[in-house]
Amino acid sequence: MKILRLWILLLVPMLSVQAKARIDTLSVENISTESEYTPLEEVEDIDDNALQVQAKGFLDTYHAVRTEGKTDWMASRTRARGEVKIEKGTASLFLSVNATYNGILKERTGVELREAYLSYAKGNFDLRVGRQIIVWGVADAIRVTDRVSPFDYTEFLAQDYDDIRIPVNALRAKYTLHSVTFEAVCNPVVDFFVLPTNERNPWAVRLPYVSLPYTIDLESGKPEKRFGNMEFGGKITVNLRGIDFSVSALRTWNKMPALCLLLSEDGQSLQVNGKYRRMTMLGADCSLPIGQFVFRGEIAGCIGEAQGGGLGQDVARRNTLNALVGMDWYPSNDWNVSMQYCHKYTSGNIDGLSVRRNAGLATARISKELLRNTLKLSTFAYIDVTNGGVFNRFSASYSLNDQIELTAGHDFFHADKGVFAMYGENSEAWIKMKYSF
């Protein structure tokens, strides 16, 4: 049955392309036979209202093996993605489907509807309703104001960043007036981070600093799916000559769970519970290109953000301030250098909480394209400034042609404490092959 579903997914784009060709042919034939009697203005209207079908997709396979300690498989998955966009006049429908076979995490094998939304765009107004990915802010691979679409950490950061984002079932409306764009977002049922807890997953959440056995529950603490728990907010973006900036506000939740540790009655084990609390985010960002450089900044104040408690302590709500500065440099000869630093400040009394007053996270990226842009070498690192940890991904990608791309790389983890400490033995070598159609 799974193989049959995979073949159906692969056939959808091909049939859609044939449908598009048939529709376009019929449209041309109809216009040709009636052109003797149809004014030019009506012909243009027919073209604008003709049904258009666009289809594309890819097939990729990714495999990784551990390079520290025991040599075992860290990931082995093959995926087919099909995307179809149907347009008629001012309305359109977009569908994106994944069919995945995962050799390590069997529960991840299956067919998944990734995005499915209806769009209506006329003049300066744009409305989108359905399952979609919403991206805010200007930061690269760091969440500051980008808090609408949560992340899937089933394989932590060992995925493409675009694949980590989780679509949300939302209504998004935009209206553009000259250089100003007004955006409103409403998410009736909030989605949260996906964190693996199954020990069979090498990327499962672990507490390396805890000596007692423990169980983790991240589901029972989630808020009820009711109208009062919906997520809503808006953003105003201004695009001027030489600078772009925006301000935003979002009534949301802490989508990354705050952990609460409870000792069992016999004192022999721990129960780790994920907690979620209402909070408000107020943010702003800007992007400023100057010559070969692009400077960017982003800031977000979170009012009432949930903070994890120490042993026997419940989570508490504190106000936090997150600020990021970054720079991209595009010198000649296809080089790219990017650096960012993000600082988080937590206010109020933090005694008994598993949080620091000040915390810093930095990123660095260097890439170079060679052989007429067919070979790309890249290294990207997260640097935990507070705890001294690092995660670095090096990759070399070669395009055989416009459809086939081969990539190999290595992920390196090093940390004694902090988030990266739980993945200290997860350094891996990996290969990826992708065919686009």
Image (cartoon, helix red, strand yellow):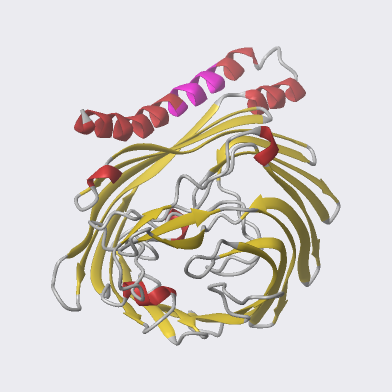
| Residue range corresponding to the magenta coloring | 20-29
Whole-percent x, y for residue 199 in the image: 25, 58
The answer to whether 225 is drawn above or below residue 353 in the figure is above
Residue displayed at 47% across by 44% down: 220
Residue drawn 37% across the image and 59% down it: 264
Outermost front residue: 266
Q: Residue furthest right?
A: 178
Q: Nearer the viewer, residue 247 or 192?
A: 192
Quadrant including the N terminus = top left
Q: Going by the picture, which residue comes out furthest to the left?
A: 71
Residue 21 on the magenta segment: yes
Judged left or right of residue 250, residue 61 is left
Q: Quadrant of residue 65?
A: bottom left
In this rendering, the count of numbered labels is 0
Q: Is residue 270 above or below residue 131?
A: below
Q: Is residue 152 left or right of residue 296?
A: left
Specify the quadrant that holds the C terminus.
top left
Whether residue 115 is in magenta: the answer is: no
In this rendering, the answer to whether 235 lies above or below 301 is above
In the image, 55 versus 131, the foreground residue is 131
* Depth check, front residue: 202 or 354: 354
Left or right: where does residue 258 sit relative to residue 252? left
Q: Residue 378: in sight, yes or no? A: no
Question: Please, what is the dominant secondary structure of the magenta stretch?
Answer: helix
Residue 205 placement, left or right of 126: left
Q: Residue at x 35, y 47 (%)?
A: 58
